[in-house]
């Protein structure tokens, strides 16, 4: 898979795909919401609800490791290593993600 320069390839709602520009200093959650991809975020980005989980499909760089808040959230929960909280991921380089259906509003 090839990436456009510093973009986020997003698959959501089953078949929809979009390429979003990375915005420095903004979380993945903020970037998705700014693009009108209405991913759930019940706690407003405080890493406590888990409703903003996304799956990292492919990244052309090592995304930063989970931070203290994200580690605290996953401390007693089972986590696939590719699952991250969108509110705690701050993309710096291109990546590809999927938003699980259960994390989109019904
Ligand atoms: S918005 Fe609640 S954990 Fe990310």
Image (cartoon, rainbow, N blue to C red):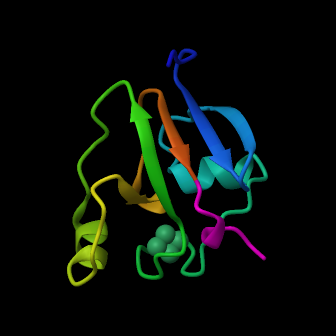
Residue at 59%, 34% in the rendered image? 9
90 or 40, nearer to the observer:
40
Residue at 41%, 81% in the rendered image? 48
Which quarter of the figure has residue 66? bottom left
> Image check: 60 left or right of 78?
right
Q: Quadrant of the C terminus?
A: bottom right
> Image check: 18 left or right of 91?
right
The percent position of residue 10, horizontal first and vertical second, equals 62, 41
Asked if one can make out residue 69 in the rendered structure from this viewpoint, the answer is: yes
Which quarter of the figure has residue 83? bottom left
Please report the bounds of the magenta region as a residue range.
99-106
Vertical comparison of 84 with 70: above or below: above
105 or 90, nearer to the observer:
105
Vertical comparison of 44 with 29: above or below: below
Question: Any magenta on residue 29?
Answer: no
The percent position of residue 13, horizontal first and vertical second, equals 73, 56
Asked if one can make out residue 91 in the rendered structure from this viewpoint, the answer is: no
The percent position of residue 56, horizontal first and vertical second, equals 43, 46
Residue at 59%, 56% in the rendered image? 99
The percent position of residue 55, horizontal first and vertical second, equals 46, 53
Vertical comparison of 90 with 95: above or below: below
Q: How many marks?
A: 0
Question: Any magenta on residue 101?
Answer: yes
In this view, the residue farthest toward the front is 14
Magenta span: predominant SS is loop
């Amino acid at each position: 898979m090839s990436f456009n320069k510093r973009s986020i390839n997003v698959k959501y709602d089953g078949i929809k795909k979009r390429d979003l520009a990375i915005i420095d200093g903004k979380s993945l959650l903020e970037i998705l919401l700014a693009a009108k991809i209405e991913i759930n975020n019940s706690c407003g980005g405080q890493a406590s609800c888990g409703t903003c989980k996304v799956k990292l499909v492919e990244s052309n760089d090592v995304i930063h490791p989970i931070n203290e808040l994200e580690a605290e959230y996953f401390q007693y929960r089972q986590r696939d290593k590719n699952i991250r909280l969108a509110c705690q991921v701050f993309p710096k380089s291109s990546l590809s993600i999927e938003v699980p259906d259960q994390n989109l509003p019904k």
